[in-house]
Image (tube, rainbow, N blue to C red):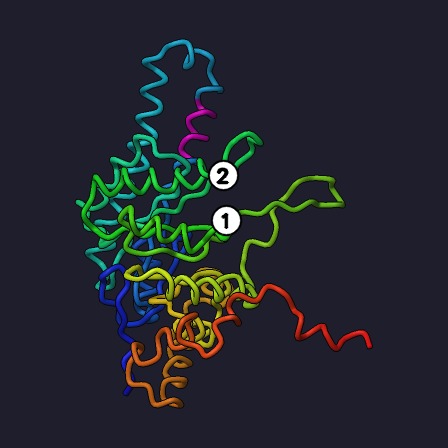
Amino acid sequence: MASLETTYLGLNLKNPLVAASSGLTGSVEKIKKLEQAGIGAVVLKSVFEEQINNEITSILLQDSQNTGYPEAEDYIRNYLRDNTVTNHIKLIEEVKKAVDIPVIASVNCVSASEWTTFAKDFQEAGADALELNIFYVPVDRKEKPGVIEQLYLDVLEKVKKEISIPVSVKIGLYHSNIVGMVDKLKAYGAKGVVMFNRFYEPDIDLNKLELTSSEIFSSPVEIRHTLRWVGLVSSEVSDIDIAASTGIHNGEAVVKQLLAGAKATQLCSTLYVNGNSVVPEMLSEIESFMKKWNFKRIEDFRGRLSYKKIPNPMVYERSQFMKYFSGKGK
C-alpha cells in the first residue's frame, strides 16, 4: 500500500492535506472531527490584528471619556489584546491535548507592532509551528513598493527573535517578484510559504447600489493561480517548504500541486462546500493516482513536473495564449 506521509515545516504529516485557518479550525470539537476524517494537520483560526484594532477603535469612540483619559485607553487596548491572545493560547493547549496531528498557530497581521511578542506565548502553549498571514493594502500613491515587501520581512524578523518553532508566511499573489520575495523570506528565517492567500475582494450590488463582498469560496479553476508559481518557486528557491492553497477541491488538484513541487496543500473552501467527507475522498484519489503510476511514496513523484525537471521549462514562463488563439477566428 502506498504511503501518503510527507513533511512540512519539519513536521511529520500522515498525508499532505492541511486544514487551513478558518472557522472550521476554531474549536476543539471541529478539529477533532477533521482529524477523524483523516486530515494531516491543522492551522488554527487566526488571531486577527486588524480586528483587534477595529474593536479597540469602536469602544473608544463609543464613549468620549475613554479618549480623554490615557490610562483608560491603555487599559482597553491591553485588555482586548490580552483577552484575544489568552483565548488563542487556550485553544492551542486544548487542541494539543485532544488530537495527535500537528497544530499550527496563526496570526493575521498588518504591522510589525508589539503583538509579535505574543508569538512566544503560542510556542509555550504547545504550537508545533506558526503561520503568519500578512496583508497590507497600499492606498498611499506615494508609498514605494519596497516598503510593502519590507513589512513582510520586518514582521518575520521580529517573530523569529521570539520563537524557535518553524514559521511559515502566507503570501498573496500580488508581489512584483514572487520568486525573489520567497527567497528573501527564506533568508529572514521562514521555514515555509503558503501560496497563495485568498483575500477579501469587494463587489458592487447593482440592486442596492452598495459595496458588498464577492464570492468568498474559491472554485476548482483557481488552482491556475498557484500551480505556475509552485512549480517555479520549488525549483528556484531551495530548502523552503511550499504549502499550495486556493482552488484545491479534490484529490487531483492535490496531486498536481505535489507534482509541481509542493510539500503540502491547504484546504478551506472545499471543506465548507463538501464537508469533512471530502477528506477521505481526496486521500483515495491520491492513492489511486499513486497505484496507477506505481509510486510507493509521495517523494517518488513530488516535484517531478516542476520548472527545472520538465523538458521545456518555458511552459511555466509562457504568458500568452499564442498557440491556442493563432488558429482561431479564421
The percent position of residue 108, horizontal first and vertical second, equals 39, 43
User: Quarter-wise, where is residue 320 in the image?
Assistant: bottom right
Give the CA separation, mark 1 to mark 2: 9 Å
Q: Residue at x 45, y 43 (%)?
A: 135
The reply to whether residue 266 is in sight is no
Residue 54 located within the stretch drawn in magenta: yes
Q: Residue at x 53, y 36 (%)?
A: 138
Farthest residue, direction right: 330
For the residue marked with disc 1, what is the amino acid?
Answer: Ser
Left or right of 96, for residue 80: right
- Where 158 sits versus 308, above or below? above
Residue 205 versus residue 314: which sits nearer the camera? 314
Residue 288 versus residue 262: which sits nearer the camera? 262
The percent position of residue 129, horizontal first and vertical second, equals 25, 53
Q: Earlier in the sequence, mark 1 or mark 2?
A: 2
The percent position of residue 330, horizontal first and vertical second, equals 82, 77
To which residue does mark 1 refer? Answer: 176
- Boundaries of the magenta span: 51-59
- Number of marks: 2
Q: Residue at x 26, y 56 (%)?
A: 103
Q: Residue at x 30, y 30 (%)?
A: 114
Residue 174 versus residue 47: which sits nearer the camera? 174
To which residue does mark 2 refer? Answer: 145
- Where 68 sits versus 206, above or below? above
Q: What is the secondary structure assignment of the residue under circle 2?
A: helix
- Where 68 sits versus 154, above or below? above
